[in-house]
Image (cartoon, rainbow, N blue to C red):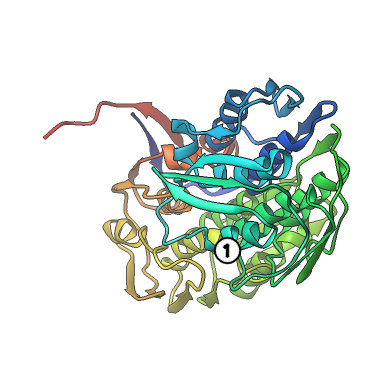
Amino acid sequence: MEKLIINGGHSLHGTVDISGAKNAAVAILPASIMVNKGISIIDNIPDIADIHCIERIIESLGCKVNINNDCVSIDSTCLNNINACTDDVRKMRASYYLIGALLGRFKKARVELPGGCPIGVRPIDQHIKGFEALGAHVNIEHGAVNVHADRLIGANIFFDVVSVGATINVMLAATLAEGVTTLENVAKEPHIVDVANFLNTIGANIKGAGTDVIRISGVKELSGCSYSVIPDQIEAGTYMIATAACGGEVTLNNVIPKHLESISAKLTEMGVQVIENGDSITVKSNGKLKCTNVKTLPYPGFPTDVQQPLSTLLSIINGRSIVNESIWESRFKHVDELKKMGANIKVEGRTAIIDGVKRLTGATVLASDLRAGAALIIAGLIAEGTTEVKGIDHIDRGYPNIEYKFNKLGADIVRITYNEEVL
């Protein structure tokens, strides 16, 4: 097993290159298996565990996958297997995109129920509603989703709740359906737009991604292309918050400032200086920050994936801050770990009441999920003394080379292998 040893108290200075967006890439790679003519070459792919998982899954289905640094080429013309039932499928949430992709191309699929971070109940009922509206029959048995259709026919679909996963999954299936599909009350996150742009590049006809209504005119076939994934909004937000917490000046390269507006606005409100420079952002912090209140919301609101890192920052700011988590009901699992380090946080349902303390102190903590892990790394960076962060397999699912990137900015983080004691 591995853990991170963090010696805190260092300000951050320099530049950091933001990788491709995890949430876009884990959908675009499954979408590429819908191509039946030519090869898809996709670059700016992040070097993270979830991506390696997806690559192994689509290879197991019969695709030819070639990886060259952050560029992946996928030849799905020989794909001959509609059963995605491996350990890798069960490990990650985004494996459910295989359902929409396989259903679109082959009109049938069998995909094991997905796993992922334990941050709350995440049913796939809206995915199923969409597939059934297109004419598919869906049933869940023996831990797998079985879906098949004689034909997929365009339909008007109104999602009961805004769901990123359902928006993308139904969009995938509808791309190769007959006629026009209209999706209403859809998610508008940047990675929704990126997946739609990729699909259009391989021959789809999708309009309205990024708005409340997406219209998809079905096509008969899709062809390979070259495509570059957008920068990761959440990775960028994490480094912005870390800089605000540690103090210093950091320039983030390879970002789209528009995607970061809610994060930039909140940090500016707190007294952080955020300067936009085309495809980069510079963050300056002198440590004299103000407490604030924040509520997570679907894009363009404040992203739930940045809530946990932000709560670490708020834990050392004088005064009371209120964080309301409106997306996931179990996204305060990191709070007990922050308390070990001296944080004064009280959780009431989906609300965290944070009374800032003068300092955090190093402790041994456990990352319960991906973004909680990022929050604990930031806590270690600002804490007095040494912090050990365990459970970093969660962190590796979404943050490429995180200790290298932070160390380049002046942090002191070491990854070590250890044997867990058996009691």
In the picture, the quarter occupied by the N terminus is: top left
Q: Residue at x 64, y 70 (%)?
A: 159
Q: Quadrant of the C terminus?
A: top left
Residue 84: percent from left, percent from top: 54, 34
Residue found at x 68% / y 37%: 29
Q: Where is residue 65? Give x, y as percent.
A: 68, 22
Residue extending farthest front = 150
- In front of the other: 40 or 205: 205
Q: Is residue 184 above or below residue 28?
A: below
Mark 1, secondary structure of its residue: helix
Q: Residues within 10 Å of mark 1 (few under 14, many from 20)?
A: many
Extreme residue in the left direction = 423
Q: Is residue 221 visible?
A: yes
Residue type for callout 1: Gln
The structure residue drawn at horizontal position 59% and vertical position 37%, both measured from the top left corner, is: 405
Q: Is residue 52 left or right of residue 150?
A: left
Left of 223 or right of it: where is 43?
Answer: left
Quickly name the residue at label 1.
126
Q: Position of residue 293 (x, y in %)?
A: 52, 78
| Res 301 quadrant in image | bottom right
The answer to which of 326 and 85 lies nearer the viewer is 85
Q: With 77 as the anchor, is 382 left or right in this view?
A: left
Q: In the rendered view, would you say 261 is above or below 405?
A: below
Res 392 → quadrant: top left
Q: Residue at x 66, y 44 (%)?
A: 103
Vertical position of residue 8 compared to residue 273: above or below: above
Image label count: 1
In the picture, measured across the screen, residue 232 lies left or right of residue 338, that is right
Is residue 404 among what the camera can see?
no
